[in-house]
Image (tube, rainbow, N blue to C red):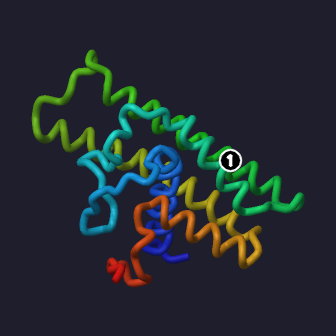
Amino acid sequence: MKLPTKIMLGLISALFAASVATAAERGAKKSQYNHHGMYCNSMGMMPGDMGRDPVASAQKHLDELKAKLNLTNDQQAAWQTFSDQVNEQAKTMAVMRDKMMDKNQAMPKTAPEQMALMADRMKDQARHMDKMADAVKAFYATLKPEQQTSFDKIHMSHMGMGNMNRKGDKTHAK
């Protein structure tokens, strides 16, 4: 697999993991989208994410996803591996959130220190995205075509891209 493809798959998978932790809480509330179809703050988090429990949100979403996919007995092991990875990602997000919210943590004072901190966080996120991409790919391969279609729709809707076409352009309801 080419590196750009692997990176893109990793990014999409990480966004899925992040959306797993937040989508269940969003409900029917309309949000504003940025030019990528997602509404995120400067830390890449959805508004209100800082006060939510990513682990509980992820578990709620996983329960709903599992029910919609109607998994067979043969798919249970792959589901368990996938859901374990989603839960691990949610726990990591909770730790990152707690670190960012820690008032006792000294923030870097200079621009180079701030950039170095941001780069380190992004490297950590990229490593987690890569793990999540592998988990999604492995689980997805066990799904039947109709389950893959359901997974795709659920995945895109939780990324805030449910109204996007294949080119990434927003479609307008008439």
Looking at the image, residue 27 lies above or below residue 172:
above
The residue at the point 31 percent across, 26 percent down is 101
| Image-quadrant location for residue 144 | bottom right
Left-right relation of 97 to 135: left
Left-right relation of 112 to 66: left
Residue 45 pos. (x, y %): 34, 46
| Image-quadrant location for residue 11 | bottom left
Looking at the image, residue 2 lies above or below residue 9:
below
| Image-quadrant location for residue 33 | bottom left
> If the image is split into quadrants, where does the N terminus sit?
bottom right
Residue 147 pos. (x, y %): 71, 71
Q: Mark 1 points at which residue?
A: 63
Residue 155 pos. (x, y %): 54, 64
The residue at the point 12 percent across, 29 percent down is 109
Taking depth in this image into account, of 163 and 16 the one nearest to the observer is: 163
Looking at the image, residue 112 lies above or below residue 15:
above
SS of the residue under disc 1:
helix
Q: Which residue appears farthest toward the left when viewing the image? A: 110
- Amino acid type of disc 1? Asp
Q: Which residue appears farthest toward the front when viewing the image? A: 174
Left-right relation of 157 to 103: right
The residue at the point 29 percent across, 45 percent down is 43
The residue at the point 64 percent across, 75 percent down is 149
Residue 27 pos. (x, y %): 46, 50
> If the image is split into quadrants, where does the C terminus sit?
bottom left
